Every structure is written in C-alpha cells, then in structure tokens.
C-alpha cells in the first residue's frame, strides 16, 4: 500500500521538466535494495504513475518520493539530465 508525495516545487516551476520516460540513452534502473524492499512489480507501477502524473502536469521535478501509508518506507525516483538514467532507489542508496 503505497501513498505518494509528488514533489516539493510547484508544477509550473521551470524545474518541473522531467517525464520519467526511459529511452535508449536514458535507461530505467533500480538499486538492489529498492528491488529487495519493494519488488519489481511495485517499482514498475510507481513508474507508470509518475509518467501519467508528468503528462498531466507537463513535467515533474527530478526527484519524486513514494512513501508507505505509515511513512516508514520511502521509494525515491530520480531522473538525471541528458544521458543519465532514471533510477528507483531507497533514500539510503543516495
């Protein structure tokens, strides 16, 4: 049961320009710890939610945080600029 906190900057801010859409030059990866704690299925579902939210708002901030309803566990998604990656990770992986 994951709740999401989308972002801290306003959606209209210049920094909200990320769409979390993997490409050949920007792969989607997940850390081992994120996979162990949340599982591949949950991570993919969260990525799809981010992509839908990004389309809805014409972009998001580079850092998005999903947290459990009890706020004890967080799953981060970070999109790098240019030829970086889109990474699912735990805060402790950062």
Image: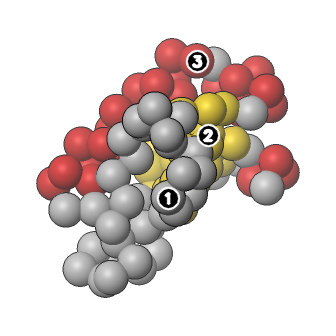
Q: Secondary structure at mark 2?
A: strand
Q: Residues within 10 Å of mark 3 (few under 14, many from 20)?
A: few
Q: Which residue is pictured at 53% across the width and 35% down the height?
A: 27
Read off the residue under disc 3.
Answer: 40
Q: Nearer the viewer, residue 8 or 14?
A: 14
Give whichever of discs 2 and 1 has the lower sequence position: 1
* Residue ranking furthest to the right: 92
Q: Is residue 38 above or below residue 2?
A: above
Residue 77 visible in the current orientation: no
Alpha carbons under labels 3 and 2: distance apart = 10 Å
Q: Which residue is pictured at 46% across the width and 75% down the height?
A: 8
Q: Which residue is pictured at 73% across the width and 45% down the height?
A: 90
Q: Residues within 10 Å of mark 1 (few under 14, many from 20)?
A: few
Read off the residue under disc 2.
Answer: 88
Q: Secondary structure at mark 3?
A: helix
Q: Which residue is pictured at 76% across the width and 21% down the height?
A: 36
Q: Is residue 8 above or below residue 55?
A: below
Task: Name the quadrant of the C terminus.
Answer: bottom right
Q: How many marks?
A: 3
Is 51 positioned to the left or the right of 25 in the image? left
Q: Nearer the viewer, residue 19 or 92?
A: 19
Read off the residue under disc 1.
Answer: 82
Q: Nearer the viewer, residue 27 or 50?
A: 27
Alpha carbons under labels 3 and 1: distance apart = 25 Å
Q: Nearer the viewer, residue 19 or 1?
A: 19
> Percent from the top left, x then y, of residue 47?
42, 36
Is mark 3 in CB contact (under 8 Å) with mark 1? Answer: no
* Foreground: disc 3 or disc 1: 1
Q: Secondary structure at mark 1?
A: loop
């Amino acid at each position: 049961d994951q709740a999401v906190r989308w972002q801290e900057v306003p959606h209209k801010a210049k920094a909200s320009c990320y769409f979390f859409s993997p490409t050949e030059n920007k792969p989607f990866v997940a850390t081992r710890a994120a996979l162990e704690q949340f599982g591949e299925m949950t991570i993919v579902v969260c990525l799809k939610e981010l992509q839908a939210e990004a389309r809805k708002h014409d972009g998001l901030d580079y850092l998005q945080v999903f947290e459990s309803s009890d706020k004890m566990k967080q799953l981060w998604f970070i999109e790098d600029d240019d030829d970086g990656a889109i990474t699912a990770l735990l805060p402790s992986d950062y």
